[in-house]
Image (tube, grey):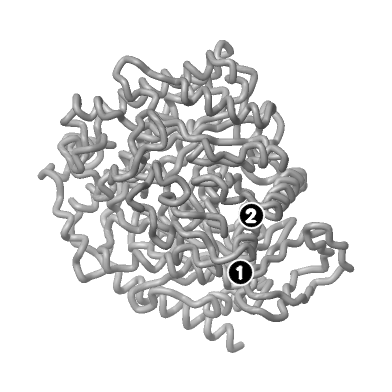
Amino acid sequence: MASGITAFFLTFLTFFSCAFQFRSMPEDATPEISCSEVSGDESKYCGVTSCVSDCNGLPTLFINGIPFPAAAYMTYLTEYNHYSRFAQADYSLFSLPVLFSGRWISATDGLTPFCKGIFDEKDAPDFSAVDARIGEIIEACPDAYIIPRVNISMPLWWIEENGGCVDSTGKRESLYSEKWRESAADMLREFIDHVIHSDYASHIAGYHLAGGNTEEWFHFDMNAGLAPAAELEFEKYLNEYYPDIEYRGLPDLSLLEGKGIYHNSEYLARFLEFASFRVADDIAFLANTAKKASGNQVVVGAFYGYSLEVTSPLYGTHALRYLLKCRDIDFISSPNSYLGERDGSADWTEMYPADSVRLHGKLCMQECDIRTHLTLPLSQAAPEYDPDGILAGNIWQGVKDKTTAVENIEKSFCRQLIKGNGFWWFDMWGGWYDDEDIMNDMSRYRSIYSASLERENRASAAEAAVFVDESSYKFMTSCSLRSAICGLRRELGNMGAPYDIYDLSDFEQVYGRYKAVIFISCANTRSFKNAVSACRKTGLPFISNSRIKESFTAKELRSFLKANGVHIYCETGDLTYIGSNYFAIHASEEGKKTVTFKYEVSVRELPGGEMSRRSDTFTFDMKAGETKLFELT
């Protein structure tokens, strides 16, 4: 009874504050992403086809018509690669960096480029470095499939010739520029044509499109890309989608520094909406270019949609809901969350609402750039690339010991396995995983992941859903609820029940599947009001954060879910991953852990454990930081 009262109070409090403190927001238009029908071209078939399709309830990579374990390896510094070690661990999927220009991936330009770019010399493309690097992978793994990360960056000569098409830094291309889009598409077609006619064409299973700042499609200036090209294209955007709003130039971004939750400028909100939409449209345009150039034979994906991690609307990453409608995008990527500078006890989630990606039939492909005890700053690992120690902050440091490294790697793997993500181990500077025990684990993970594709039901086991509204960020000031989602994600991971997480735009499609829902940082738009109305009409319990209650503890979330019929698997506040076929627990502190299921099951600890007797409750001892993975039968 007490827990029910608590849940009722939380529901009442949060909805009350949400309804009466959030002012009504103007409604969005519905722009259309660049997308056109692409059919396969048999003349471009190179002995390999790939796609993303359903496999037992989850979007899955298929290569040559067969479900393929999307577990890969990549390093930036290919001269320090460990392709052979991963091939010996049974990995046959790889990535590698392909640079259109030899410029550093960050707008700071303070680091030495990794290598010469393909198009660094005007009218003289040089593919020799790419050919050699791909040859190294194939030599180490003759049956390798490769999805290169293609950094679509403009060389210096292009910047000098197209001064009106650069961003506010004056050094890099503007993501609003039509001339940039045309040039980028031409370069992409030329690269793919080279691949198709190469002797390694049958090994190239797709293209990972990267660009913008840090290759993750942020505006290079991280400040909405203010530049002449932005002015021209924003005026076109208003004329097409908001003809009642008179164009008045670029808006005053200082309004984002106001003291309230929301700024009061619809003009600013429309520009911020445009700043994200245009980046998503760029990605869709280039994805369509890649599909046509490859005859629609292989998968194409991109980094994008970081609404769980990047709360500033100035980066350009808040239009995932449009990009998911694009038929030319097969997978969405992000690094594992950097929440708390990769605090080992935190849940390293995807940076985007992953279940919206899955709902739209696309693969979540995670970059697992896990620092280990062997990780050195770039200035030490390869000083020729970072002689001034620019990448020397805490986030670039290795962990204190091997035990911690092993625990972090296993925790990350368990999330990818149970959520059904593809992933690649990103050995950024090389040698991070050059340890016999770690590589034995890597081999074990590849085997477990491959076997998981054969399970009959891989669908989510969650009874609770979380909704974040990426469209809210354009209305919010920097001192608002934007930051609440980062703290809430940590609590979600420790509440003891699995959850699915979506963008609010998918609410109507999925809310009927769940017993309770949690709204995070949703402005009072029509979409949010409709979602709340649907919950009230159907009796679906919900809570939402607000200015009065910006966040919830794991204990409060657990109480709310439990009171409303959601099964709680673990009550001790440890990080838990629960799926239809596996469960994992990462111990927050030392002690006995109890996991309780809704019905009797048998479990087997991986690797090599004995199958248990059937029961609905399992108790075991764990050390702080330890991760245990179990198979369910």
Residue 459 relative to residue 488: left or right: right
User: Of 230 and 80, which appears nearest the observer?
Assistant: 80
Q: Viewer-nearest of labels 2 and 1? A: 2
- Image position of 100 with respect to 323: above or below: above
Question: Is residue 253 left or right of 529 when viewed as pictured?
Answer: left
Q: Residue 216 lies in what quarter of the image?
A: top left
The CA span between labels 2 and 1 is 14 Å
Q: Residue at label 1?
A: 575
Q: Quadrant of residue 454?
A: top right
Which element is circle 2 on? helix
Q: Locate the N terminus and report the quarter of the image it occupies.
A: bottom right
Which residue is at the far top? 43
Q: Amino acid at mark 2?
A: Phe
Residue farthest left in this picture:
248
In the rendered image, the vertical position of residue 153 relative to residue 25, given as above or below = above
- The spot of residue 84 in percent (x, y) is 66, 37
Quarter containing the C terminus: bottom right
Q: Decide which of 271, 74 is in the foreground and name it.
A: 74
Q: Residue at x 47, y 79 (%)?
A: 10
Q: Would residue 302 appear left or right of 270 to someone viewing this image?
A: right
Which mark is first along the chain, 1 or 2?
2
Q: Residue at 50% across / 67% down in the picture? A: 343
Which residue is disc 2 drawn over? 413
The residue at 39%/60% (across/down) is 393
> Residue 260 location in percent, x, y?
22, 70
